[in-house]
């Protein structure tokens, strides 16, 4: 089983790679474009996948993944199942601050088919932050892109003095308050 | 002219969109061209309808002519009604030559012998379609022109499309009359219903794009086409999976447009299979459950489920068999025997 590992490849100079995993491709594409629009001073590559494991034929072309963002749509149980199945293909050491969950669709209360409890448990079990964002709205999409970019920089080690793990702990502690 | 006829014509004209009134009246042919010239089609529909009624008064229209206008309206706008499909069959191999006059005579005679108060109108169209309009009354009341049933019969086929009227009790009589008039033995209701008459015809006459179980060799060209406007910094990891979904979709649904259906209904009479620890139902009885899918265009939305990332491809055959089986109402019972499971009842 091909598992995504955080440190199995050498990092490239001044670059970072983020992997978005989710079943809604058009939303992924929009978020990726929003991320690219932001100002940054490093090379970025955004990998879009519908599920894990990633196809092995592209392994040698892929850079080291610094951040994985799993996208769950509250309106679709299928997207939650998809993410849960994909989580099994991620190495445990990724969950030390290099994974986050993006939960979209929260604006439409009448169409929720995934329980908030299930999402919260997911965040707890995998010790990763859960960001609630209504990605269909452009303003929130831009804000989420900015947050992801900031997290990506930390996870890629571009910010001296702040590691992914310490940032992850910071986010969890502030969420609990 | 009868007051009820006048009112009926007025209401029928009011239903027609303003731009279509002139052409529909011309098709009707009851008013002469000179009379039509006197009508002002730029006023409100209310006024137009009053003028039309006045002209019909001058020509002494009766209910038969008014009914023809109604048939014309329903022929152009059939999607305002729900149509059910019926199939007739006959034992034996005799292929009778279809005689239209004979059909009409037998149909009228059968209906009128059972129920004196009916208004029956026929109109033939191209592609051998016979439209029948029936207004139902009771032994004591004149036919109610607003409670009508419509029948579309393609004489070269055993299929009949019936628009259910409010009076469901008249359906057996109607079916009987059809069977007798067309020299068939019996008639059964296919579990297929929709608003879109043309789509129903497409399904039973197999006019939609069918899929064949052949291997689709992927043309080399497809691989080399690079999509424009794609930033090279965005990398699609699952491109081959996406292509597989497209291929499966094409194999299941075909390339052309799907017939338009609005719902699919599954009546489940299967046993509830739960975690033995859950113990929800101790009684070993089938768990009755109704699952209904509704959509403005059901088959197209099923086709786009997998590409949109909302379901796995291929979809359940219970959903994809709808056009081939020509039904959208299913009863699913437990399969009795060695292998547990469910099967679709015929």
Image (tube, coloured by chain):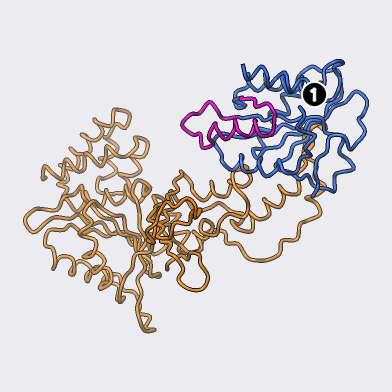
Chain colours: A blue, B orange
Q: Does the magenta stretch include residue A126?
A: yes
Give the image location of residue B242, x and y in percent.
Answer: 71, 47
Q: In which quadrant of the rendered image does the N terminus of chain B lie?
A: top left
Q: Is residue B119 magenta?
A: no
Q: In this view, does A80 lie to the left or right of B236?
A: left
Q: In which quadrant of the rendered image does the C terminus of chain B lie?
A: bottom left
Q: In which quarter of the image is residue A104?
A: top right
Give the image location of residue A160, x and y in percent.
Answer: 87, 16
**Which residue is denoted by mark 1 in the rendering?**
A164
Give the image location of residue A62, x and y in percent.
Answer: 86, 38
Q: In which quarter of the image is residue B336?
A: bottom left
Residue at 81%, 21% (x, y): give it: A154
Residue at 51%, 73% (x, y): give it: B338
Mark 1 secondary-structure assignment? helix
Marks counted in the figure total 1
Give the image location of residue B11, x and y in percent.
Answer: 23, 39
Q: Residue furthest front?
A: B277
Dot 1: chain letter: A
Vertical side of B344 occupied by B237: above or below: above
Q: Residue furthest left?
A: B140
Q: What stretch is highlighted in magenta?
A: A104-132
Vertical side of A151 occupied by B68: above or below: below
Residue at 39%, 57% (x, y): give it: B282
Q: In this view, does A133 lie to the left or right of B179?
A: right
Vertical side of B121 occupied by A85: above or below: above
Is B325 or B176 nearer to us in this picture? B325
């Amino acid at each position: 089983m091909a598992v995504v590992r955080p440190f199995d490849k050498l990092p490239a100079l001044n670059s970072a790679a983020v992997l978005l995993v989710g079943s809604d491709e058009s939303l992924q594409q929009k978020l990726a474009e929003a991320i690219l629009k932001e100002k940054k001073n490093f090379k970025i590559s955004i990998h879009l996948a519908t599920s894990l494991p990633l196809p092995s034929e592209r392994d040698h072309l892929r850079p080291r993944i610094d951040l994985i963002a799993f996208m769950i749509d509250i309106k679709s149980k299928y997207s939650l199942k998809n993410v849960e199945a994909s989580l099994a293909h991620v190495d445990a050491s990724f969950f030390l601050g290099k994974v986050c969950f993006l939960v979209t669709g929260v604006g439409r209360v009448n169409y929720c088919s995934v329980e908030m409890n299930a999402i919260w448990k997911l965040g707890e079990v995998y010790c990763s932050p859960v960001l609630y964002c209504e990605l269909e709205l452009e303003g929130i999409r831009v804000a989420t892109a900015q947050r992801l970019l900031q997290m990506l920089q930390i996870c890629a080690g571009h910010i001296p003095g702040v590691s992914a793990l310490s940032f992850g702990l910071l986010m969890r502690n502030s969420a609990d308050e | 002219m009868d007051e009820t006829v006048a009112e009926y014509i007025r209401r029928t004209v009011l239903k027609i969109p303003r731009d279509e009134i002139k052409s529909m009246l011309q098709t009707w042919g009851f008013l002469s061209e000179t009379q039509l010239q006197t009508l002002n089609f730029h006023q409100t529909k209310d006024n137009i309808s009053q003028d039309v009624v006045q002209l019909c008064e001058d020509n002494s229209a009766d209910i038969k002519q008014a009914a023809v206008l109604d048939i014309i309206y329903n022929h152009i706008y059939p999607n305002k009604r729900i149509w059910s499909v019926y199939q007739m069959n006959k034992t034996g191999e005799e292929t009778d030559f279809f005689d239209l006059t004979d059909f009409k005579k037998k149909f009228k005679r059968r209906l009128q012998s059972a129920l004196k108060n009916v208004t029956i109108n026929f109109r033939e169209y191209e592609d051998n379609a016979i439209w029948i309009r029936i207004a139902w009354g009771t032994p004591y009341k004149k036919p109610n022109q607003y409670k009508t049933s419509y029948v579309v019969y393609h004489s070269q086929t055993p299929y009949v499309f019936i628009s259910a009227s409010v009076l469901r009790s008249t359906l057996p009589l109607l079916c009987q009359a059809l069977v007798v008039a067309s020299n068939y033995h019996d008639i059964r209701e296919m579990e297929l219903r929709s608003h879109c008459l043309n789509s129903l015809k497409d399904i039973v006459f197999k006019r939609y794009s069918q899929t064949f179980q052949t291997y689709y060799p992927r043309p080399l060209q497809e691989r080399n086409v690079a999509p424009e406007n794609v930033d090279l910094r965005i990398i699609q990891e699952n491109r081959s999976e996406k292509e597989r979904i497209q291929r499966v979709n094409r194999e299941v649904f075909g390339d052309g447009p799907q017939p338009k259906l609005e719902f699919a209904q599954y009546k489940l009479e299967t046993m509830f299979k739960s975690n033995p620890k859950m113990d929800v139902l101790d009684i070993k009885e089938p768990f009755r459950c109704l699952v209904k899918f509704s959509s403005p265009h059901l088959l197209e939305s099923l086709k786009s489920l997998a590409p949109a990332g909302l379901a796995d491809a291929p979809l359940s055959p219970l959903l994809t068999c709808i056009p081939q089986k020509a039904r959208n109402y299913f009863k699913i019972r437990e399969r009795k025997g060695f292998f547990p499971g469910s099967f679709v009842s015929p």
